[in-house]
Image (cartoon, rainbow, N blue to C red):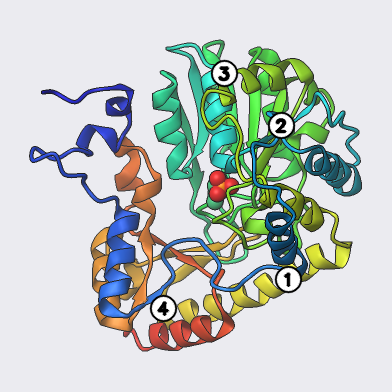
Amino acid sequence: MTISGAWRRTARGAGLLADDGSVAASIFAEMSALAARTGALNLGQGFPDEDGPPEVLEAAQRAIRDGVNQYPPGRGMPVLRAAIAGHQKRFYGLDLDADSEILVTAGATEALAATLLALLEPGDEVVTFEPFYDAYGGLIALAGGIHRTVPLRAPGSVTETFQPDLDVLRAAVTDKTRLILVNDPHNPTGAVFTAETLTLIVELAHRHDALIVTDEVYEHLTFGARHIPISTLPGAWERTVTISSGGKTFSTTGWKVGWLSGPAALVTAILAVKQFLTYVNGAPFQPAMAVGLDLPDSYFSGIAAVLKAKRDTLATGLTRAGFTIALPQGSYFIVADARPVGYTDGAQFCRALPGLAGVVAVPISAFCSPDHRAEYASLVRFAYCKTTDVLTRAAANLATLSPA
Ligand SMILES: *Cc1c(COP(=O)(O)O)cnc(C)c1O
């Protein structure tokens, strides 16, 4: 029997099933297995190795004890939708109607999947920056869309970050573009986009009648550069779906509670798809996320300050080791160029790194379309959302790498 389906259109899908029916490992799975096998420090996958705020964890335990264990409402529990509305008002001055303009989802991932399936017709073009979060390529393909990318250019010095060429962005968005999907702060590069770039995205969306979808899961993890949700810019709200999640903000990536907001008509169209994906999820985690979103401002500034110190610990180690790095302005990740330490192939370097320095990283090529991997071949991503002890040891190990 031939096993086929829409998944075959995805970049990994093409090579996902081996002839013997086994599943080919992604580079993420391969690197995590390598970390487990060698005992190397795992700076590959982007999950924190410390628990989030105790009040949030306790609220989930209390909800389970209190019997919050059955299907919540399709749009999400009222207490969480009210907390999301309160959060968008407090941090961004947005006034949302919690009944019609907010939808709770199974993580940002389901919000992205339902949004793309709801808003794309087969053949519609979607523009993203590249490198891109790996799920984007898969989800666009599953929805029958055509993926166009705008490269983020590697910076010339450590004080710069990856940014797009605005003329290339202008050329990429055309009347065939249905949707511009923007991840800001950006995984894997740590870039925070400038107001000029965000304003141009809104302008282009108007000119070509495109929608904007934003992935803001790192909204509270920026270091100096202020996060600007595109939906707050003039003319943006009516055509923008804003997506976030509690996983990164509250160190609860395993809970998979996310949300989206936007004009009621768009949210309703997305709900029509979402009801047939998960229907609902995570009942006891929803009131706990509400507790998190209601935490005082000091919690949110505190996590950014702690993460900034971790970024600096790892950045210092990488620089001492001889890597060229781009100092990230946000997110969990630093991108380093392995050429100065003697490697032109990031994937090969990542396979060697546990033996060389007892550290695991992932190659940036895993975040690129097959046609563009060569341009990013020597770059690797290190996660610094780890304990200070792990980062200090990783930095010390990396510093022993001798430059070629
Ligand atoms: C982690 C991550 C997600 C996934 O969020 P979930 O809430 O776990 O589904 C989405 N986008 C980006 C850029 C991420 O880094």
Disc 4 from disc 3: Cα separation: 47 Å
At label 1, the amino acid type is: Pro
Q: Residue beneath label 4, please?
A: 322
Mark 2 touching mark 3, by CB under 8 A? no
* Residue ID at (60%, 72%): 311
Image depth: mark 2 or mark 1 in front: 2
Quick one: label 4 or label 2, which is nearer the N terminus?
A: 2
The quadrant of the picture occupied by the N terminus is top left
Disc 2 from disc 1: Cα separation: 26 Å
Image depth: mark 3 or mark 1 in front: 1
Queried on whether the Cβ of the residue with tag 2 lies below 8 angstroms from ligand 1, the answer reads no
Q: Residue beneath label 3, please?
A: 118
Disc 3 from disc 1: Cα separation: 37 Å
Q: Residue beneath label 2, please?
A: 73
At label 3, the amino acid type is: Ala
Q: Which mark is residue 54?
A: 1
Residue 288 in the image, given as x and y percentages of width and height: 74, 55
Residue 206 in the image, given as x and y percentages of width and height: 71, 16
At label 2, the amino acid type is: Pro
Mark 4 touching mark 3, by CB under 8 A? no
Q: Is residue 345 visible?
A: no
Image depth: mark 1 or mark 4 in front: 1
Of helix, strand and loop, which one carries label 4?
A: loop
The crowd level at tag 3 (other Cα within 10 Å; few <14, some 14-19, many 20+) is: some
- Picture quarter containing residue 59? bottom right
